Image: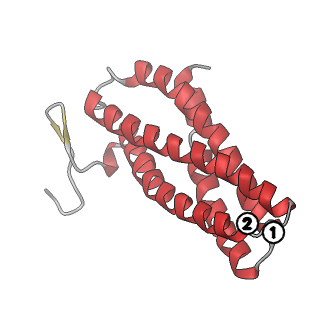
Amino acid sequence: MNDAHLHLMVNHFPILGLIFGFGILISGLVFRNNGIKNTAYSLFVVSAIFAFLSMYTGEGAEELVEDMPNIGHHIIHEHEEYAEKLALILYVLGALSIYGFYLNVKTHSRARLVSIIILFVAGIGLIFALKTGTSGGEVRHTEIRDTVVEGVHVETPDGD
């Protein structure tokens, strides 16, 4: 098992955990249920841990695939840039989630405000998750690219 394989095993959870956590947090806010919010916080913390693992294995995966035909350094660099930003957002989100969990346990008056801040940060994270996931998919899935890589033209859905 190499770093590319490990990267593929761990890189989906930060995005999926963020998506599910976002939806669960919304329902926790709507129903004013701390248990539901704490479930979302748990997902955000686990997503941050998996983001670290994804970043850790990503460098080795890059070394293995960057010289493969039809990959290109530009595609990997773009994915890496989005992934670094997403990882930072997830680290902040994980830390805020631990704080939010603490405030919920202590039934602190600021718990709802922190939940809303966490929801906002998670929303920003979703934007970067979309960019990271799409650019990561483009590394090996040429059918979703709409650009030319190293002189190879990839046809877009509109026939260009």
Circle 2 — which element?
A: helix
Q: Relative to residue 123, is residue 144 depicted above or below?
A: above
Task: Residue at the far front: name it.
Answer: 109
What residue is shown with label 2?
Answer: 111
The residue type indicated by label 2 comes to: Ala
Farthest residue, direction bottom: 31
Secondary element at image label 1 = helix
Q: Quadrant of residue 102?
A: bottom right
Residue 2 image position (x, y, % from top left)? 57, 19
Few, some or many residues within 10 Å of mark 1 (<14, 14–19, 20+):
many
Is residue 72 visible in this depiction of the protein? no
Residue nearer the viewer, 66 or 22: 22
Left or right relative to 42: residue 20 = left
**Number of marks:** 2
Residue ID at (48%, 45%):
86
CB of mark 1 within 8 Å of CB of mark 2? yes
Q: Which mark is residue 34?
A: 1
35 vs 85: above or below: below
Label at residue 86: none
Residue 91 image-quadrant placement:
top right
Q: Quadrant of the C terminus?
A: bottom left
Query: Looking at the image, what colour scheme do you see?
Result: secondary structure
Image point (22%, 55%), residue name: 156
- Disc 1 residue type (three-letter): Asn
84 left or right of 68 in image: right
The x, y position of residue 41, in whole percent, is: 72, 56
Q: Residue at x 73, y 73 (%)?
A: 28
Q: Residue 106 vs residue 55: left or right?
A: right
Between circles 1 and 2, the one closer to the viewer is 2
x and y percent of residue 46 in the render? 70, 45
Q: Nearer the viewer, residue 61 or 38?
A: 38
